[in-house]
Amino acid sequence: MNIENAQVQMRKGILEFCILHVISRGEVYASDMLEELTSARIMVVEGTLYPLLTRLKNAGLLDYKWVESSSGPPRKYYVLTDNGKLFLDAMQDTWLDLADSVKTIIKKTDEAIQTQKPS
């Protein structure tokens, strides 16, 4: 098994959750979203982000509006819909439950390793 592939799959699993969180703070431009995700070490490229944003919009979880720009073409800013907020709340609950479960398992593993070490 390839560790890099496993890591990519783990990150992909939480990408949608992180994107919705970023958008939940207010109107956001896609390149700002990319920058924040990248700075948080969630590697994503435009070729992944834009189709995901389109899928989330088609699912009714987000919407966008065009805003004129003085330095170029209009910009598309994304916002969560009411359904998107409810969806994110449910994902948040699931994330917190999963994080607690994983912490419990890791803690038990660490404790087992500590008891196996010679004094």
Image (tube, rainbow, N blue to C red):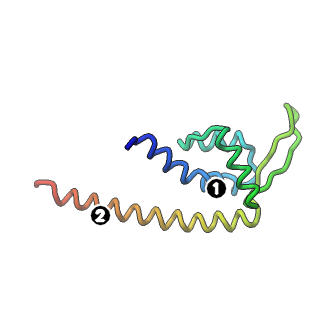
Query: Badge 1 local density, few (<14 within 10 Å), some, or many (20+)?
Result: some
Q: Position of residue 35 (x, y in %)?
A: 64, 39
Q: Is residue 39 above or below residue 9?
A: above
Are circles 1 and 2 on residues that touch, CB within 8 Å?
Answer: no
Dot 2, how many residues are within 10 Å of its Cα: few (below 14), some (14-19), or many (20+)? few
Total numbered labels = 2
Which residue occupies 54% across, 66% down? Answer: 94
- Judge left or right: residue 26 versus residue 1: right
Q: Element at badge 1? A: helix
- Indicate the amino acid at tag 1: His
**Residue lying farthest to the left in this orientation:** 119
Q: Residue at (74%, 54%) from the top-left corner?
A: 26
Of marks 1 and 2, which one's residue comes earlier in the chain? 1
Kindly identify which residue carries mark 1. Answer: 21
- Closer to us: 40 or 54: 54
SS class, disc 2: helix
Give the amino acid at mark 2: Lys
- Residue at x 55%, y 49% (from the top left corner): 12
Residue 116: image location, x then y, percent: 16, 57
Q: Nearer the viewer, residue 72 or 83?
A: 83
Rendered position, 84 above or below 16:
below
Mark 2 lies on residue: 108
- Alpha carbon of mark 1 to alpha carbon of mark 2: how far? 30 Å
Placement of the C terminus among the 4 image quadrants: bottom left
Give the farthest residue toward the front.
1
> Is 86 on the left or on the right of 10, as rendered?
right
Residue 87 lies, in percent from the top left, at: 66, 65
Q: Nearer the viewer, residue 85 or 12?
A: 12
Expressed as whole percent of the image width and height from the top left, the position of residue 97 reads 48, 67
